[in-house]
Image (tube, coloured by chain):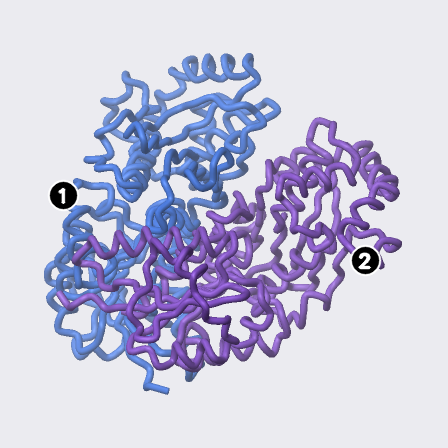
Chain colours: A purple, B blue
Amino acid sequence: MPAPRQVFIAVIGVGGVGKCFLSQLSKLASRQSQDPSHPTYLSLILVSRSNKLLFSESYRPLSLSTWEADLDASKTPVLDPLAIAEYLSTAPEKVVVVDNTSSQDVAENYPIFLKKGISIVTPNKKAFSGTYDLWQDIFAVANNGQGTGGYVFHESSVGAGLPVISTLRELVETGDEVRRIEGVFSGTMSFLFNSFMPVGGGGGKFSEEVKKAKDLGYTEPDPRDDLNGLDVARKLTILARIAGLETQSPTSFPVQSLIPKELESCKSGDEFMQKLGQYDGDMEKLKKEAADEGKVVRFVGSIDVQKNDVKVGLEKFDVSHPIAALKGSDNIISFYTKRYGDNPLIIQGAGAGGDVTAMGVTGDLIKVLRLLR
Amino acid sequence: MPAPRQVFIAVIGVGGVGKCFLSQLSKLASRQSQDPSHPTYLSLILVSRSNKLLFSESYRPLSLSTWEADLDASKTPVLDPLAIAEYLSTAPEKVVVVDNTSSQDVAENYPIFLKKGISIVTPNKKAFSGTYDLWQDIFAVANNGQGTGGYVFHESSVGAGLPVISTLRELVETGDEVRRIEGVFSGTMSFLFNSFMPVGGGGGKFSEEVKKAKDLGYTEPDPRDDLNGLDVARKLTILARIAGLETQSPTSFPVQSLIPKELESCKSGDEFMQKLGQYDGDMEKLKKEAADEGKVVRFVGSIDVQKNDVKVGLEKFDVSHPIAALKGSDNIISFYTKRYGDNPLIIQGAGAGGDVTAMGVTGDLIKVLRLLR
């Protein structure tokens, strides 16, 4: 039995998902250290948040139980991604960066990390839904792309911990022909429309439901960041690219924003929320139209791979459709392929939340650890 | 860029799934050989069926386009698994065995293959649903278990190409608490009950529907092999073990057989089919009972992990339940876990068929190739 191999972990971003991830990491490291047959053991060597950073100059492991207090006590200002890459590249063992931010800046530096042999696991959508050039740069150098650098996995960038990206990649890699992908890709939009227009009737005014969703923590602090459709557009960009399309950016296809034109100039989220009620009429009209047809309204995304047609917006669904039957903030993603024929391969479940998002990240980390043996 | 590494492939069993697999393998090998950056290239060195075998004495690759005619022309009698393991163990490169049989004999030799560093990918349920000792032996020696031998993957042993096993393993490995697993695990039973009692009424007598399913090729040649529930029991045994239960065998928990007691002694499938109609009354009664409650009858399996309670049999479901809404021969599997809460993680789609089963095997092969780099 060879001696277990140490792998260094650097965690950038310790918000909701980051905290859940560190809790899962702590349990994973403890399970692995108790299993003498396990081929790796994990050492945390860097944790950073927006304003400060904690790192181990000598690469001796930081504590996975007191990292939060230790980070609070740290006087080290945050480093830019390049400086972090520099520090990690001199580490005496393999390194995995866990990017729990939604930072464009960190994302743009992935190729540099990867080139240095550093692997990346992340729920951050920015790198994979930004410019097509960045996408190509990342997979040109990644070991699980065309390169020999570090590995990169981003399961949680779509559908949180649901096996969406791994499933699509496997369909493609095993030679299936993916024809169409459709579904509800936003936990926020799912919750909002399941409340606004539940099957069987009911639901309040649209602005009231947005407020409720916001109060319950289902939206971003500024709900416009959900209602503009960009989050769903980013996810579709990622899936379209994996399916083989050269989708240039999340704004290169039609995306319906639920922000009324007149409110696009609102200076704050608060102002927007105060005025949204004035535009409830449009959504009420749509709701009534759908109800008259025996349908419900849902906010969905779809990719027609054959026609290279990607779109995001409101659609009506029969009340018997699986998309209409969704509950809570669940996502549902249907893959229509040559092998699966008329009945798609469907994946459904919570697509948002700290623990399930972190689970996708931890799962990716386990995949990298196997590959780094 | 390091030179690509040759990996040898040995295929045991070339029936429905085996043929589909070899077709997918041929395309995969061709794609990989056209990609100079790809780290492996694949060489077929052995193909066998029940009565004969084709192998390359010098380990020079067999043809992936003419293997079928070459195997027909071969005069080499089939070797037992031990002799095959012996031959493969002297190969100058890493070897992956693809077991497309449902043979108990091949399955029982997995630990020997694995010990010799040979990896295994398979849809064969026998090794993972046989004795608990065999299960332990396999994962004690497998590299993705506690050992340092070959790798073993068996995604297609449950739900064909659907990502059922990989998802359950990830839930467990990332530290989620799997509480309950339930679903429709048999394409045959799905088709049979979706026809016997469709939502909205209709459907013929049970024996007529069994005959129809048999004529359409949805059942085993002898339908008793489906109706006895053992296929579903084997799948549940596998999932229960991955979830952490020490389920001893597929007959160590309650399994409802749909073979009437009086027909258990039938000498042939034909005799059984002729007499089954005499027992339609019981199923009609159940169907009426369910209809009166606004429900439908389905053949399902469930695992209550906390109570260590595994069972297989008929249950009634509300017509609005996702299990009632299944179409064709689709499977549906719901994972109830601590992280996912009340709304389970659900995977749904075709759970039988040559191409989708082979896809799970090809996907597993790709995983092994990554790990063998």
Q: A219 or B89, which is in the foreground?
A: A219
Q: Are marks 1 and 2 in contact (CB under 8 Å)?
A: no
Residue occupied by mark 2: A267
Question: Mark 1 vs mark 2: same chain?
Answer: no
Query: Can you give x and y, in whole percent of width and height, for residue A268 in the image?
Result: 78, 55
**Label 2: few (<14), some or many (≥20) within 10 Å?**
few
Q: Position of residue B30 (x, y in %)?
A: 42, 76
Task: Give amino acid for label 1.
Answer: Asp
Residue at the (40%, 49%) spot, across then down: B167
Mark 1 vs mark 2, foreground winner is 2
Q: Is residue B285 left or right of residue A289?
A: left
Q: Is residue B128 positioned above or below B206 on the image?
A: below
Q: Camera-side residue: B15 or B169? A: B169
- Residue B186, image x and y in percent? 40, 38
**Mark seen at residue B133:** 1
Residue for point 48% across, 42% down: B345
Give me the chain letter of mark 1.
Answer: B
Of A173 and B30, the residue lying toward us: A173
Query: Does the image show residue A187?
Result: yes
Q: CA distance from mark 1 to mark 2?
A: 67 Å
- For label 2, the SS is loop
Q: In the displayed structure, would residue A114 be above or below residue A350?
A: below
In this picture, residue B168 sits left or right of residue A319: left
User: Who's the residue at 30% across and 68% down the image?
Assistant: A7
